[in-house]
Structure formats: structure tokens, C-alpha cells
Image (tube, grey):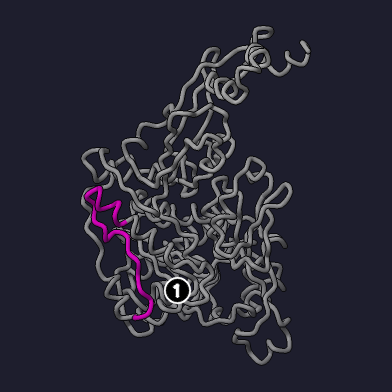
Amino acid sequence: MAVVLCQELETRGFGLDLEAIREWLRGRVSELGMRIERGPCCVSRWSLDKALSDGTGLVLGLCSHGYSVPEFEAQARKVGLDPFGVEVVNLGAYCAQVHERSQATAKAKILLEAALASVGASPESRPDNIKPVLLWDQTLSRRSLFTLPPVRYEPVAFIRKGDCAFTEGCRVCATTCPRQALEPSEDFMALDKTRCTGCGACVSACPQQAIDLPGVSPQQINAQIATLLNGASLPIHPRAILFVCARSAPTLQGLADQGLSYPASWLPVEVPCLGVVTSTWLLQCLNLGAVAVGVLPCLRDDCRYGKREVTEGRVAYCREFLSVLGAPPDAVRLLDPRDERELARALSSLPEQAQEPRADRPRDMALFAPRATAQALLGLAETFAPSLDRSLAHPYSPVGMVTVKQGCTACESCVHACPTEALRMHRDQEKVALTYDPGLCIGCESCVPVCPERVVSVEKVTDLSRLAQGRVTLHEDSEIRCEACGAPVAPGAMLKRIAGMLGPEDAGTLSFITRYCNSCRGSLT
């Protein structure tokens, strides 16, 4: 691991104590190389060479974001660095220019430690993770016009086929993608790089954690958030998370350049697009101990995700859910980047914690774990609500509630279609049971269209009492056994359904089917 800090941070705004930061990080991270250089914000070749000699993971603490990304990526590749494995932290706009020196230094320590955790957890990017883009709208130096190729590389999603549940029928990523970049192929989910914008929506939607995108892989986000909220005990309390669209980062730079300030409690997490930030992320941050979570979109017409209403809907759901619990809805905020002064005002206050955090509050719970949503919902309910007798119907509920009406034949079509194993079939010698765990349900409705009897339905409802119940039985039936070998033949309801389809003239065939399993039927004919 290596960290390069811009020396100008000592005098930018209120300034940072760089020597204190260096000594503190060395005490926290083993085998850490540290450099304090004048002007690494211009991303000089010398600074990258020196950083590489200390390790392959690199964090740059810069005084501004005023550098050319294409030039940086080209220089990084020349010295053997993966540019998508480098974390760049704007310590000028996020710390030195907006907080007094001691607070700014403490916040810089937290942000750098979180960046190191993210780099340490970052999977190595591969050719499948990048696509070339022409440099039509990039600002380059005159020298770079002659030395750089006329393209830069942007990250795109990569699906690990060994972890993907495509062969089991999962299509969640394809239905989530706003650009139709993911399409089912013969035996795998295919990605069209020309359509992919790298928004990351598929990464957080995938129930198998089978998709990587440089910068927002599940391992990186988990490590970064856990470090921000539960890192070293420093005088930054309480702590709040601010999810920032990468294209809105200049807004915070402009806010800092105007001398506008806000509480140091706001810890920024830059993501390529807010399409990757789900309501589970927002609520789980609160469950992990954040006093508030902010969302700063880009509001651009060429948004990578292109579905602003989804982000607004997720925030609205979280606020309504908190209101149902009796918690302050202002703990989740959708911010407006168009007016820097209004943005500073919106960030100026933090909600009061209604109660002290639970002593057994989770400290490193994964945002992508199968039960992360249920754990966040129930954890917040335990903190704020006097009982679990609460529910919220909302189109952006991150969980769904499955019901099965009379007429189920236990054919298992819904079980095979469920990408999270919320639906399972349990068998014993006498009975077959369709069971359901609402804590694993993501409300994708994949089970609905495959039901031949049309008896399965899904409601976008957050029902805390049902979530707390765990796995329950939705349908139970007798299991007919083979008279010859004792193997299962079919559930009783299915055989009745077959009898109704065959009619009385096929009574002999029906008797044969109901008495013997497939294997024995073959040997008896």
C-alpha cells in the first residue's frame, strides 16, 4: 500500500497537519509507504514511480480534483499501476477548505483509512472491465495531445460466470439495467460494452454478488462503509454518510471554493452513479450507526443511469419507513446540487439521535449480504419502534411479500425461478411443503409469470412482523409414493390436476401414473 499526499494541503483553506496524518496512518496500516509531495495534483510521473516502489495499492490525497483523468490513467499504466485500482480523495474540498484544522485533519484520517480499505479489497480489473472511449470532451495539455492516444478507458461491469445464477433462471441484472446492456445468451448473461455506461445498478441488484465494476465492487463498498462508520475513535461524532455521484463531485469543490462550510460529520463516498445506491444501502448505513445519509445526484440529462425517479423513489421509501418507525425521516436526504449555498444549508444540520445506538449494533455487516435488507429493516425497528406491528406498502420497497392462493400443485416452477432461494420446497416421507422466507425476498416477481396455476402473487410491502417470523409454509400437500420402490411420484394436488385434464376415459392411465414413479413406469411397460 502507498499513500501520496499533496503538500499544498498544509496551506489550502484551514490546512491539514500532514505529518500527524502520516504518523497516524503508519500506526494503523502495516507495510504502508507514505509520500508528501509538492503538486501531485498534476499527477507527475515521478510521484507515481515513487508510489509504485512502495506497493501496488495506491491512494492519492489531493488538494483538488483539478487534474486530467486521461493523463493520470496514461501515467499510471506507464508505471504498471491499474488506474481503476487507485483511490483519489479530494482532501481539499472535503476537509481542508471546509473545516477548521483539527476537525479537517481528523476527517482526512478517516477518509484515507477508508480509501486504503477500499483499495485493499479491490478485485484486479481485467480487459473485460474496460471499454475505450474517444476523447472528444476532455481537457488535455498541449503535450498530452501529442503523447496520449486519442482514447481513454472507462470501467464497465463484468459478470463472473461461476457465481452467476443465469442457468437457474435469474434475470434480475437484465431487468435492472437501464440501457439494455445485459441480454440472455445461450448459457450465460452477455454484456454489450457499447451500451454499458458503468452506472453500477446491476452490481447492487445482483442477488449472487456475481458482478464486479471497478470502484463499486461489493468488497470495496463493504470495506469502505464499515471503515467510515466504525473506524478509529476520532473526534468526528456523530458520523453521516454522503453518497456523491462522481459527476456531482465538482459541486462540493465549488462549495469549498466559496468558503461555505458544513459539519465534518458528513463523510463522502463517491460512486460512478447513484443508480448503484439502493434503499438497502441507505438504511443499512443508519443501522450501522450513521446518524444520517445524504444522496447528491448529478441531475444531468446524460446521467449514466437515466432513471432519476428511481433514486427519488428509493429516498422517499426510506423516509416513509423511518416515519412509520417513529424515527426522524430527515435522517435520509435527497440533496440538490444546483445551488451551492442551498446545499451548504441543507448539510448544516444533523438529526438528533432518537435513541442511543444498540450495544449489539453490527459493525461490519455487508451491504450486499442476502439478508442485509431484512437485517437493516429489523435492526432499525428494534432501535426506534416499540413493536414490530408495522408495515409499509410502497412501490420502491426493497422486499416483497409472496402469497399463494388455493390451487397450488407444488410443481416447483416458482422455486426454480426464485433467484434468492426465498422460495424452497421441503419434502419428507409423507408431505411436501412450499416454504417462504421474506427476509430473502427482493420482490423481483420472477415467481409470478412462471406459475402455471396463476396462484402466486407478490406485493411490494415491508411487513416487519412477517420479516421477523423467518421461513414459513405457504402451501402443504401429501406426497404420493411409488408402490414399487417408495420414491416420490407427485404431490396429491398435482395428481388431481392431471386427473381433471385426462378425464374418466383415461382412468387406467391415471391409475398407472399415480401408483408408480417415472423409473418404475419404464420398467413395468
Instruction: From the top left corner, tell me how far across and down residue 189 is, in percent.
Output: 67, 52
Residue 43, percent from left and from top = 60, 79
Residue at x-position 46% and y-position 41%: 441
Image-based side of 499 in relation to 239, left or right: right
Please say whether residue 109 is visible from this viewpoint: no
Looking at the image, is 113 positioned above or below residue 146?
Answer: above
Q: Which residues are magenta?
A: 319-339
Residue 223 in the image: state x and y as whole percent: 49, 53
Residue at figure coordinates x 21%, y 40% from the top left: 386
Task: Tell me the kind of residue under disc 1.
Answer: Cys
Residue, x 66% and y 17% (percent of image)?
Answer: 506
Q: How far across and down, in percent of the image, does residue 521 sit?
A: 73, 15
* Depth order, front residue of 80/187: 187
**Residue 429 visible to the viewer:** yes
Give the total number of marks visible in the rendering: 1
* Residue 504 in which image quadrant: top right
Against 480, residue 333 (above or below) is below
Does 257 appear above or below 281?
A: below
Residue 13 among magenta residues: no
Quick one: 194 or 504, which is closer to the camera? 504
Please determine whether, in this image, residue 170 is positioned above or below residue 137: above
Image quarter (top left, top right, bottom left or bottom right) of the C terminus: top right
Which residue is under mark 1?
Answer: 298
| Residue at the farthest top position | 484
Viewer-proximal residue among 468 and 190: 190
Q: Which residue of the protein is positioned furthest toward the front in this rendering?
A: 505
Looking at the picture, tell me which residue is in the foreground, 52 or 187: 187
Q: Crowding near pointer 1: few (<14 within 10 Å), some, many (20+)? A: many
